[in-house]
């Protein structure tokens, strides 16, 4: 169907089947090109597939399990091909489905309780329903409105992720699906008790998958659902119901973990999780400054005391052996989720929440866990956010509570003094017997918290006075913290291009070469000239005329070509560690101002590259050992009398101009002598460095 060239086209296998007098749907489904023919809108094929009997058989393959002893094609291939035929979005086939109520009943019979629900067929069912929802929205929603028991059946099967996706779309989290008529279409759904049905799954089921998918559905509703549902889920009565389910002692721990995830989403709607439905709306933004409803926050504070009781680790006897010792007991996902919830609650900056946290002593208990579990980085990250949110709070009582009641400064100093893991069996984290105790793993977080304290002291005289009155703190800050900050300041490292702090927030897939702090094109041109004059490759000298007579187009590099060159050079440098590195502290940009002394004296008929001494003013005052080694044919690696100064590769205002073309630069730029020892060092490197070939560039570009 794709090729209609006279004399070259061959008959499609699908056409061959359609030409038969008697053929079956199975024969078509077994043909590999049927999906291509559907997408190409093969008229004969579509006319056959639109028939009611054929649509019915396609639906049976999707919603009914294959009988025992069925062929492999019936079990695997036919259901897949049937699903793909519907999702080709051929309008006439979809119309034949939605216009026939009997066929729609057959499709949604998959949700019946007596029906088997394999994950494979659930995925096919989900794809077909979502396709109908996108292409035949009004007819489908009219059918659902007339059969409202379908919503309850979807909730009952919420533990199947594919069914959960269908439910989320029906609820209206994808409001753009319904267009301008979404309000009228979804009003009856908003009036249903669908939220109550979802919450009931936390009490009626013990399956962790059901709890996770029910929580994901509720989280999606808090972010994207219509206003009525969003208002109901954030109401105090609904939140109270959530916590009643979460704090039932007889319920599995996954109930509390997942319901706290819903509460976190209510407090911070912009805090997207990595759930399934997140992928549908990852391009949508909630806008800046999203804040929690004060009534929502207040309704959560009543259960805060019960949550803090669960942070107690003294009553558990479970032990987990680790490489550094043992945990008795492990912190666990439930305690970690409680601390994350408190972290978000503190970040809301609600005065009532801050007073309740102070009254219950929540910060003291959380800080104890921070020091009791020195290797739990997830815990440390949440505690750091809590401390920083407290320090940035406008409530001075909150800051005073952290400094005085929680004794944060003393805890930091004690950890710095006793920086190895304790062997005390009464503590939750114990070092392994017979081994050297390892260093605790939260020193980095303590350093950042200490720096935040100092920063706050610069703007708050009370905090600064409190810190200065502690002589141990002043001594530690002067002798330890300042030196540590200087050592860890990457912008001061002189080992190459420093890593900028802004790169921390860059996604790994971002194209960052435009943001480099050096001119990529200029660097590549300088490297090109280095190879052109044989500094790193003896083969370049043998090229002669081809090196000097290149056009400007051959010399100039754009940014993309420069990336290929630099990648290739890095690859060669990594493979041959014994050779000289191209990315040392040498001043590569000196080539922009350099030329060859005898460029004008060589004459217009010069056809080969002269020796290096004709272009370089070799320093005859070099060491005798160097000259002797030169006479013996040996290569000297004696260091230069003048150490090459470090040149920082940073983009200047000049780099905004087009890079210079070196063929013109050689005719006008003055010459610059190169020290003899530098030249010998370059020559030594060229012996170990392989010349850059076109294959290398291709390899680097890949």
Image (tube, rainbow, N blue to C red):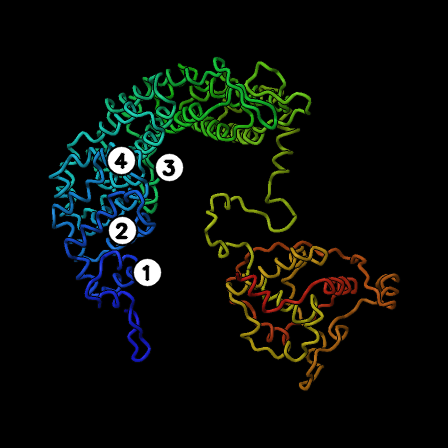
Mark 2–mark 3 Cα distance, whole angstroms, equals 30 Å
- Check disc 2: other Cα within 10 Å, few if <14, some if 14-19, many if 20+: many
Mark 4–mark 1 Cα distance, whole angstroms, equals 41 Å
Name which of mark 3 and mark 1 comes first in the sequence: 1
Element assignment for label 4? helix
Comparing marks 1 and 2, which lies closer to the viewer? 1
Whether residue 406 is visible: yes
- Check disc 4: other Cα within 10 Å, few if <14, some if 14-19, many if 20+: many
Name the residue: 22% across, 46% down: 129
Name which of mark 2 and mark 3 comes first in the sequence: 2
Residue 47, by quadrant, is: bottom left
Comparing marks 4 and 2, which lies closer to the viewer? 2
- When the figure is inspected, residue 256 is found, relative to residue 55, above or below; the finding is above
Q: Which residue is mark 2?
A: 83
Mark 3–mark 1 Cα distance, whole angstroms, equals 39 Å
Q: Which residue is mark 3?
A: 273
Element assignment for label 3? loop
Name the residue: 19% across, 40% down: 109
Name which of mark 4 and mark 1 comes first in the sequence: 1
Horizontal side, residue 523 vs residue 150: left or right: right
Seen from the viewer's position, the closer of residues 166 and 402 is 166
Mark 4–mark 2 Cα distance, whole angstroms, equals 28 Å
- When the figure is inspected, residue 126 is found, relative to residue 345, above or below; the finding is below
Residue 72 placement (x, y as % from top left): 34, 50
Seen from the viewer's position, the closer of residues 12 and 394 is 12
Name the residue: 25% across, 41% down: 166
Residue 700 placement (x, y as % from top left): 56, 61
Comparing marks 4 and 1, which lies closer to the viewer? 1
Residue 575 placement (x, y as % from top left): 66, 57
Q: Which mark is residue 221?
A: 4
Tell me whether circle 3 and circle 1 mark residues in contact (CB < 8 Å): no
Q: Which residue is mark 1?
A: 32
């Amino acid at each position: 169907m794709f090729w209609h060239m006279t004399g070259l086209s061959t008959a499609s296998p699908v056409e061959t089947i359609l030409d038969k007098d008697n053929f079956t749907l199975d024969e078509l489904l077994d043909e590999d090109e049927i999906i291509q023919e559907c997408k190409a809108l093969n008229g004969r094929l579509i006319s056959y597939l639109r028939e009611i009997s054929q649509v019915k058989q396609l639906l049976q393959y999707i919603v009914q399990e294959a009988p025992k002893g069925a062929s492999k094609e019936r079990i695997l291939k036919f259901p897949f091909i049937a699903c793909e035929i519907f999702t080709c979005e051929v309008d006439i086939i979809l119309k034949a489905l939605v216009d026939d109520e009997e066929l729609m009943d057959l499709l949604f019979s998959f949700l019946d309780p007596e029906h088997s629900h394999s994950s494979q067929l659930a995925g096919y069912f989900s794809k077909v329903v979502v396709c109908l929802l996108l292409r035949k929205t009004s007819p489908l929603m009219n059918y659902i409105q007339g059969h409202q028991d379908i919503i309850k059946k979807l909730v009952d099967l919420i533990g199947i992720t594919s069914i959960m996706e269908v439910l989320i779309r029906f609820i209206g989290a994808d409001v753009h699906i319904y267009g301008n008529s979404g309000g009228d279409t979804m009003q009856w759904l908003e009036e249903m008790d669908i939220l109550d049905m979802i919450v009931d799954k936390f009490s009626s089921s013990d399956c962790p998958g059901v709890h996770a998918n029910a929580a994901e559905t509720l989280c999606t509703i808090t972010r994207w659902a219509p206003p009525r549902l969003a208002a109901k889920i954030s109401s105090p009565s609904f939140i109270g119901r959530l916590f009643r389910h979460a704090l039932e002692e007889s319920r599995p721990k996954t109930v509390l973990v997942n319901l706290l995830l819903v509460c976190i989403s209510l407090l911070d709607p912009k805090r997207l999780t990595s759930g399934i439905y997140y992928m549908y709306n990852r391009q949508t933004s909630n806008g800046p400054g999203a804040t929690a409803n004060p009534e929502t926050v207040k309704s959560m504070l009543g259960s805060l005391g019960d949550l803090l009781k669960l942070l107690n680790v003294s009553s558990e006897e479970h032990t987990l052996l680790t490489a550094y010792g043992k945990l008795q007991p492990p912190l666990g996902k439930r305690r970690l989720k409680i601390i994350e919830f408190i972290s978000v609650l503190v970040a809301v900056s609600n005065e009532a929440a801050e007073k309740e946290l102070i009254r219950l002593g929540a910060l003291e208990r959380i800080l104890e866990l921070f020091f009791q579990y020195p290797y739990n980085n997830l815990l440390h990250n949440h505690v750091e956010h809590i401390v920083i949110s407290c320090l940035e709070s406008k409530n001075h009582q909150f800051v005073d509570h952290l400094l005085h009641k929680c004794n944060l400064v003393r805890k930091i100093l004690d950890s710095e003094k006793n920086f190895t893991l304790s062997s005390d069996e009464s503590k939750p984290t114990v070092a392994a017997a017979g081994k050297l105790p390892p260093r605790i793993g939260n020193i980095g977080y303590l350093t950042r918290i200490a720096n935040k304290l100092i920063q706050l002291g610069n703007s708050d005289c009370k905090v600064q006075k409190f810190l200065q009155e502690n002589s141990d703190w002043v001594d530690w800050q002067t002798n330890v913290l300042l030196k540590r900050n200087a050592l860890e300041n990457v912008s001061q490292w002189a080992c190459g291009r420093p890593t900028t702090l802004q790169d921390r927030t860059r996604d790994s897939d971002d194209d960052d070469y435009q943001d480099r702090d050096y001119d990529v094109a200029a660097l590549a041109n300088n490297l090109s000239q280095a190879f052109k004059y044989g500094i790193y490759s003896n083969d370049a000298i043998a090229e002669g005329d081809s090196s000097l007579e290149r056009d400007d187009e051959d010399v100039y590099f754009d940014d993309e070509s420069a990336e290929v060159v630099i990648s290739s050079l890095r690859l060669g440098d990594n493979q041959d560690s014994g050779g000289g590195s191209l990315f040392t502290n040498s001043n590569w940009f000196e080539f922009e101002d350099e030329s060859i002394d005898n460029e004008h004296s060589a004459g217009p008929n010069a056809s080969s590259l002269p020796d290096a001494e004709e272009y370089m003013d070799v320093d005859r005052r070099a060491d005798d050992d160097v000259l002797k080694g030169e006479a013996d044919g040996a290569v000297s690696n004696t260091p230069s009398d003048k150490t090459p100064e470090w040149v920082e590769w940073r983009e200047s205002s000049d780099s905004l101009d087009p890079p210079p073309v070196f063929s013109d630069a050689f005719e006008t730029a003055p010459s610059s002598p190169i020290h003899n020892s530098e030249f010998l060092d370059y020559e030594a490197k060229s012996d170990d460095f392989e010349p850059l070939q076109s294959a290398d560039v291709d390899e680097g570009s890949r």
